[in-house]
Image: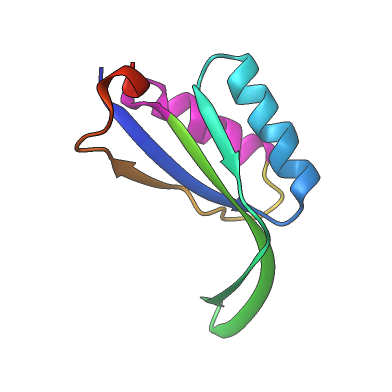
Amino acid sequence: MEPILIVTNFPEKEQAIAFAKKIVDDRLAACVNILGSCTSVYNWQGKTEFADEIPVLIKTQKQHYTKVEQAITAMHPYELPEVITVPLSGGLPAYLQ
């Protein structure tokens, strides 16, 4: 097993909850954390943009990455959603199981 953390953001909490429920129900993630609202500052199409977003942390296995990415792009309202994968170099073994 190769645990990974996938990070994304949704513009609305309800969208993040629907997404999290789907991938947990589909057994593509063991746990999804939906954090409180944050302000993102980024460059999009040559302009500096500001957006309130809901960070989402997805704990899963590397073997599920492609399906999780597909679920994000299918359910996300953004033209180009953030999808970042962070490899996990360690953790409490019983939790990672």
Residue at 67% x, 45% y: name it: 76
Q: Residue at x 53, y 49 (%)?
A: 8
Q: Nearer the viewer, residue 34 or 23?
A: 34
**Does 66 sit above or below residue 5?**
above
86 or 67: nearer the viewer: 86
Q: Residue furthest right?
A: 14
Q: Give the image location of residue 56, x and y in percent.
A: 57, 46
Q: Main secondary structure of the magenta part?
A: helix
| Quadrant in the picture for residue 37 | bottom right
| Residue occupying the point 32% across, 26% down | 62
Please identify the residue farthest to the bottom as the structure is shown: 47
Residue 97 at x, y percent in the picture: 33, 15
Name the spot of residue 39 as percent of width and height, x first. Answer: 63, 72
Find out whether residue 62 is within the magenta segment: yes
Q: Which residue occupies the extreme left position in the image?
A: 89
The correct choice, above or below, for 27 with respect to 22 in the image is: above
- Whether residue 36 sits left or right of residue 44 in the image: it is right
Looking at the image, residue 38 sits to the left or right of residue 7; the answer is right
Question: Considering the image in quadrants, where does the N terminus appear?
Answer: top left
Estimate the x, y position of residue 50 in percent, counting from the top left. Answer: 65, 78
Where does the magenta region start and end?
60-75
Rendered position, 93 above or below 87: above
Residue lying at 60% horizontally and 24% vertically, measured from the top left: 23
Whether 8 is among the magenta residues is no
Q: From what the image shows, is residue 35 above or below residue 94? A: below
Please name the colour scheme applied to the rendered image.
Answer: rainbow
